[in-house]
Image: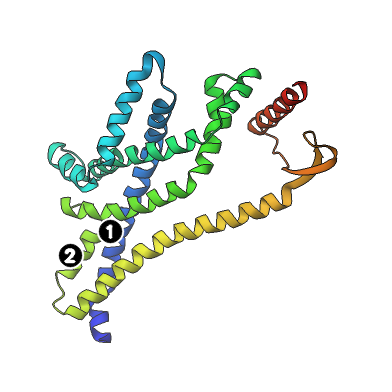
Amino acid sequence: MLALFYQIFTFANVTFMLKGLAMSVAIAVLATVISMFFGTILALIRTYANGPFQWASALVAVYTEFFRCTPNLLWILWIYFTIKGNKIAVSVFAISLFTSAVMAEIFRGGLNSIPKGQFEAAQSQGFSFLQTLWYIVLPQTYKKVIPALLSQVITIIKDTSFLKMVDVAEFMRNCAIVMGSIYDVRGMIMLLAFEAICYFVICFTLCCQRISENHCDRLRRADSWINISSPLRGNSEAWAVPLPMLSLRSLALNTMTGISWMRLQSS
């Protein structure tokens, strides 16, 4: 068994397979960045386009639903056989075309979770619509969708294995070439286990990063919260609010809180 292991996992074979793994990660990163950019734009159009631009919202809805309800592998094969060019560029385009629709729905859910009163309060302070999106709405949206976004990134990493079907030199394809020289079932099982471990390490690392971020976020909130007199319950009671950061976004949020309190006091 040990001799079989050394026969399979030679320096040349391991280097060849890890080059494929690096290619898979690079394609996943490029597809993620592109999909996040276009997914954000599509989500903004579908959420806020109205009036004479209602047709744009309907068009985005058709695009997102059509691609979300069809397999990713189908579009990889279709684009590969219809668009000629660099295999890596075509692969990134194919994955991004599908994933942008999924990202759009993720970001749309985050946008819908933002209270509409924040737009009204921001406009009362002189913020334009674009400034409200940039400084107030989008930062909160990205923070809210991190769990779903991270899950989709993990899915993109695993979906790069589909590129084996179009002969892109990614991880699964390179491992399949190495497996072609193995005639022992035990060796095939060891190689498949190696593939599974590599994917697991990458994806689980992303999961652990999210868990660590959540823990640090809770610690920061515990350290930064202060007690102030509650304007809604009288000066005798106190409530906890986070110590604000000195930024335009936090200034706008604090201003909106003050406006809401003043309205309640006047009523």
Q: Position of residue 211 (x, y in %)?
A: 53, 58
- From the viewer's perspective, tell me whether residue 203 is left or right of residue 190: right
Based on the displayed image, in which of its 4 quarters is residue 83 positioned? top left
> If you read the primary sequence from the N terminus, does the residue marked by circle 2 or circle 1 appear first?
1
Tell me the kind of residue under disc 1.
Answer: Gly
Residue in the picture at 46% in, 58% down: 207
Which quadrant would the N terminus be assigned to in this image? bottom left
Residue 87 lies, with reference to residue 254, above or below; the image says below
Based on the displayed image, in which of its 4 quarters is residue 226 positioned? top right
Residue in the picture at 57% in, 24% down: 119
Q: Residues within 10 Å of mark 2 (few under 14, many from 20)?
A: few
Residue 225 lies, with reference to residue 63, above or below; the image says below
Circles 2, 1 touching at the beta carbon (< 8 Å): no
Q: Residues within 10 Å of mark 1 (few under 14, many from 20)?
A: many
Q: Residue furthest right?
A: 236
Q: Position of residue 149 (x, y in %)?
A: 43, 46
Tell me the kind of residue under disc 2.
Answer: Ile
Q: Position of residue 250 (x, y in %)?
A: 66, 34
Residue 165 lies, with reference to residue 102, above or below; the image says below
- From the viewer's perspective, tell me whether residue 43 is left or right of residue 21: right
Q: Determine the CA span between mark 2 and mark 1.
A: 11 Å
Q: Residue 174 got which mark?
A: none
Residue beneath disc 1: 20
Residue beneath disc 2: 177
Residue in the picture at 59% in, 26% down: 117
Residue in the picture at 28% in, 52% down: 160
- Secondary structure under tag 2 reads helix
